[in-house]
Amino acid sequence: MRALFIFMFLATTASAESPKVVTDIAPVHSLVAQVMEGVDTPDLLLEAGGDPHHMALRPSQARALAQADLVIWVGPALTPWLGEALAGSASVSLPLAPDLVEDVDDPHLWLNPDFAEAWLTVIAEALSQIDPDNLATYRTNAELAQQAVQALTQKTATQLDAIGGARLLAAHDAWGHFADRFGLQIVGAIKSHDDAAPGAGHLGETRDMISIGAVDCVLSEGVETDALVATVVGDSGTPVATVHPLGAGIDTGVEFYSGLLSGVAQAIAACVEAG
């Protein structure tokens, strides 16, 4: 019994000494979880598939932010509400893309695995600064995760080689980094901004693109955009792929990032080939 008590005390102490880390979105959470594996698990503010641009923090989430040792997030271009919540906070803030300007640059950088690979080093160094006792673990985990991302990048490129140059119409303007990295074309977006309903003129233009055969596949994001996509596609027969930039429907955690990119590549390849 005494040995059990000592074990429980040591486990509790080790847990208490682990850094409290909060992440914004599931892709970032997955990368951080890989670096922290064997030490602890980061918290996630926004569940996969949620709207990163607009969110009201629950009291429990506000407390988690206030108590965090480190907050790792993409940056204010993606989650402006998080920047406001962190103002005046004692938590260390690590925006992975701090130089993006909202409505000017595309903040969906995680869809290009080259950025994810670079971020792993940044994440490991930030964790090492606040938790130097686990520096070796963080750096080793980051190196292993980078190797996994490199293999994922090659796998994704192979999946998409056969449809190089395919013309994609996106439900909203989120796929530029993915398309640029893997040799695809984003020929337009039904919604230019996440919070802006497309006007009649713009909808007409997208319908015209489809009618003249200028689109190989339309990218929907599920229930949020299915009706809008159906309105544009009509009876043209243009194939539709359901892909979500935040990985709606994928279990969060260490394997999330790999599942996200592999699933997107598979869905887009199947969609284009179906046309």
Image (spheres, helix red, strand yellow):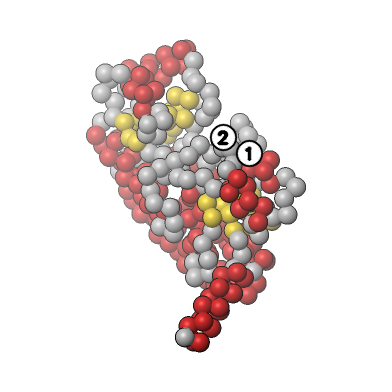
- Residue 87 shown left or right of residue 159 in the figure: right
Mark 2 crowd level (few <14, some 14–19, many ≥20, 10 Å Cα): some
Q: Which mark is residue 112?
A: none
Residue most extreme to the front: 1
- Above or below, comparing residue 166 to residue 207 in the picture: below
Residue drawn at x 50%, y 57% is 31
Residue 177: x and y, percent?
Answer: 49, 41
Is residue 167 at all visible to an observer of this figure?
Answer: no
Residue 162: x and y, percent?
Answer: 30, 43
Res 185 → quadrant: top left
Q: Secondary structure at mark 1?
A: helix
Residue 247: x and y, percent?
Answer: 42, 44
Residue drawn at x 67%, y 52% is 66
Label 2 is placed on what type of residue?
A: His
- Above or below, comparing residue 195 to residue 121 in the picture: above
Mark 1 crowd level (few <14, some 14–19, many ≥20, 10 Å Cα): some
Residue drawn at x 54%, y 58% is 42
Q: Which residue is mark 1?
A: 81
Residue 141: x and y, percent?
Answer: 51, 68
238 or 242, which lies in front?
Answer: 242
How far is mark 1 from mark 2, CA to CA?
A: 7 Å
Marks 1 and 2 close (CB-CB < 8 Å): yes
The tag earlier along the polypeptide, 1 or 2, is 2
- Residue 90 shown left or right of residue 248 in the figure: right
Res 233 → quadrant: top left
211 or 248, which lies in front?
Answer: 248
266 or 54, which lies in front?
Answer: 54
Q: Which residue is mark 2?
A: 54
Position of the C terminus by quadrant:
top left
159 or 261, which lies in front?
Answer: 261
Residue drawn at x 30%, y 18% is 234
